[in-house]
Image (cartoon, rainbow, N blue to C red):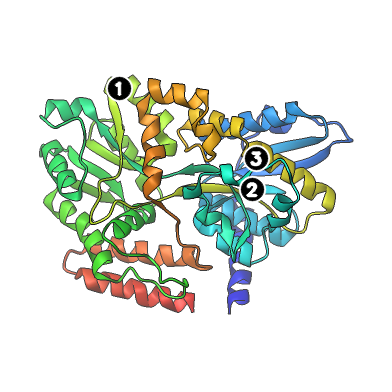
Amino acid sequence: MKKLGLFLVMAIALMVLAACGSEESKDTSSGSAEAASDKIELTYWYAWGDKIGENNENLVKQFNESQDKIHVTAEFQGTYDELHAKTQAAFAAGNAPEVTQNEIASMGVFAKSGMTQDLTSFIENDKEINMDDFNPGLMGNSYVDDKVYGLPYLRSTPILYMNATMAEEVGLDPAGPKTWEEFEEYAKAFTNGEGRVGMSLPIDIWFYEAHVAQAGGTMMNEDNTEVAFNSPEGAAAFDFWRNMSNEGTMKLSSGTEAGDKAKQDFVNGHSGMLFSSTADLSYLLQLAEEKGFDLQTYFMPKGKEAKVPTGGANLVMTSGLDEEKQQAAWEFIKFMTATEQTAYASEYTGYLPSRLSAAESEKMQALYKEKPQFKVAVDQLENGIARPMAENYPEVVKILIDEMTRGILDESIPTEEVLDTAAEKANAVLK
């Protein structure tokens, strides 16, 4: 059944790739320059544009200029979901990129289906790389069956963003809310009955994972064979959203544009707070400056516990490469995750510095002093937990989001029914 499921996924992905084939792909100087014929050619696929896309292109350009044996072409592929679908399709067609990104919850799917290369032997045979230098809070999703399949690259946690100027105007403490109860109080104070709410929030699995963990629960059982969100803790997390939505202090939205809408509401002053990735920090600071308000960042408010999921992507090598391309791909992955490049990416985007040496570098310490907003996510890593990596977790996520959306739209459906229905469907997929 699992192999059949994989073939179906690949078939769907092929159709997605064909549908996307007519779309114009981003092609910048780092990827379009003609390389010397004696260089080893690699293709690197990445997700997300704006500052994140610029960072990828800049680092690839730096790699190409740092040596004369390997040339990497960087290619933008859309969101994580689009990147994954295209990678699956390209792998099935025999023309996958040598290096790509796996969003961390998808590491297990790609590794167990044989699409990504086990990097353990490369690490063991390389005297230059120091695995102890990677932040332990970010390594949980690098391992599949006790083997390393990816190195932390652009990694994140969700953090709380607040319009501190607006908070001052409504008489709130700029120190920000530290608990769920305080968060609800802040949301009420921001809500004015004239279109402004405390928070605009997408119905997003990452934030739900955070709140389930903060309530003391888990999304999956220990061996990832069944879901565990249909529990009192899972219900507490969903009711946290549902109650605030019913009170009018939180605007919940679904769909592919929901995350962008939430950010737009925040930037345009239609909400006082925002949950979003630390990866959005540079971009949101820029927009806040343009809009003329003070943006501050905080830990996610805690429930019974102060846990928070990590996010973002690991760099992976696709399987089936010849030895020459394997070694070239490994050199590229090492460069992209090295201390200097990690510090560059963190400063440029707001993503976490995945290496301890990068976080402790003069460059990052100077940034934290100048802009303490960048340090919040780094400090919050003490509460970081890995995301589930069940082989069919992406399907579980879709089922749960659909049922939660149904429950938000129809207040008459009991929370237990929403989660039990989602659990029944999800467990069928897992089995």
Residue 198 can be seen in this image? yes
Determine contact: label 3, label 2, CB under 8 Å: no
Q: How far apart are marks 2 and 1 (CA)?
A: 36 Å
How many numbered discs?
A: 3
Q: Residue 75 carries which label?
A: 3
Q: How far apart are marks 3 and 1 (CA)?
A: 32 Å
Q: Nearer the viewer, residue 336 or 73?
A: 336
Q: In this view, does 254 lie to the left or right of 108?
A: left
Mark 2: few/some/many CA within 10 Å (<14, 14-19, 20+): many
Identify the residue shown where x is 30% and y is 60%: 212
Q: Residue 100 carries which label?
A: 2
Q: In which quarter of the image is residue 333?
A: top right
Q: Residue 113 carries which label?
A: none
Determine contact: label 2, label 1, CB under 8 Å: no
User: Label 2 is placed on what type of residue?
Assistant: Thr
Secondary element at tag 1: helix
Look at mark 1 in the image and give the residue it sits on.
291
Percent x, y of residue 287 = 36, 26
On-image quarter of the N terminus: bottom right
Identify the residue shown where x is 63% and y is 59%: 88
Percent x, y of residue 104 = 52, 53
User: Label 3 is placed on what type of residue?
Assistant: Glu
Q: In this view, does 343 lie to the left or right of 181?
A: right
Identify the residue shown where x is 28% and y is 19%: 292
